[in-house]
């Protein structure tokens, strides 16, 4: 059953700290993983991300010291650097209007969406720091979808937040008024046994809320 396959994938996924350097993910499978990110949901449908795929060993070697010298960086098959949009989510860039125009709605509805977006997000986009915070949250949705899609086909992954953001951005020669590094993810094949999955019990995490609870 699909439900069981999904559950199996979630149990298979873990933060793989070291990959088998002799194994490479084929391009068709990697495209499937990246497609999972591309198809991810995002607030207002803005898709405020870009995925940089690093296969080159020399570039991985330059990135590793900037990523707390983590072995995942150089042992993985593919390193995906997820960029968060800064300029493209701003109403004045014209990109949000193009995103809304894709919807099969009357012009007046499209205009209403543009107005709502500009007004609702005005404080969120007040400066680049706030804009990054919003865009990066959307990027994490794509990150999760890519990791889970990878696990579904028994590809290992490791999300990476431990890196020197400004130094990485300089190495990649990013214009940070347009794009900033949100998070990275290494993909490949495990070389060590999977450790036990440690999680809180369901009953400690899930609580059904009713109106009486907040009255």
Image: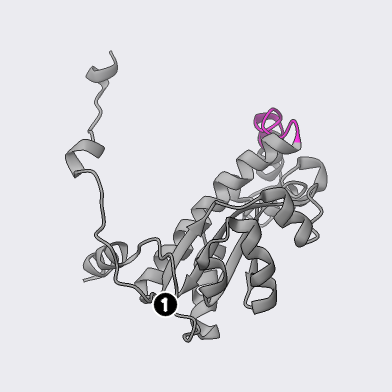
How many C-alpha atoms fall within 10 Å of the one at disc 1: few (<14), some, or many (≥20)? many
Q: Quadrant of the C terminus?
A: top left
Q: Which residues are magenta?
A: 116-127
Residue in the picture at 47% in, 85% down = 23
Q: Is residue 117 magenta?
A: yes
- x and y percent of residue 108 in the render? 70, 41
Residue at the far top in the pictured view: 215
Q: Is residue 176 magenta?
A: no
* Residue picked out by circle 1: 189
Residue in the picture at 26% in, 57% down = 197
Residue in the picture at 40% in, 61% down = 15
Counting every numbered tag in the picture gives 1
Q: Is residue 84 visible?
A: yes
Secondary element under disc 1, as helix, strand or loop, is loop
Q: Residue 156 versus residue 107: which sits nearer the camera? A: 156
Residue in the picture at 67% in, 42% down = 132
- x and y percent of residue 55 in the render? 62, 77
Q: Residue 65 versus residue 194: which sits nearer the camera? A: 65
Q: Residue 144 versus residue 193: which sits nearer the camera? A: 193
């Amino acid at each position: 059953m699909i439900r069981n396959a999904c559950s199996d994938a979630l149990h298979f996924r873990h933060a793989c700290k070291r990959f088998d350097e002799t194994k490479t993910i084929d391009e068709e499978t990697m495209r499937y993983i990246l497609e999972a990110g591309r198809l991810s949901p995002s607030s207002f449908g803005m898709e405020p991300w870009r995925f940089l795929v690093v296969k080159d060993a020399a570039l991985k070697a330059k990135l590793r010291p900037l990523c707390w010298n983590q072995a995942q960086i150089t042992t993985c098959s593919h390193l995906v650097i997820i960029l968060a949009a800064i300029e493209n989510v701003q109403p004045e860039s014209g990109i949000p209007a193009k995103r809304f125009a894709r919807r099969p709605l009357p012009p007046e509805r499209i205009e209403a969406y543009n107005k709502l977006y500009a007004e609702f997000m005005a404080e969120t986009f007040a400066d680049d720091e706030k804009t990054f915070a919003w865009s990066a949250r959307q990027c994490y949705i794509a990150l999760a979808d890519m990791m889970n899609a990878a696990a579904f086909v028994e590809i290992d992954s490791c999300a990476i937040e431990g890196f020197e953001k400004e130094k990485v951005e300089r190495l990649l020669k990013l214009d940070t008024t347009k794009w900033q590094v949100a998070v990275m993810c290494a993909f490949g094949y495990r070389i060590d046994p999977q450790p036990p999955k440690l999680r809180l019990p369901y009953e400690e995490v899930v609580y059904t809320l009713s109106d009486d609870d907040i009255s």
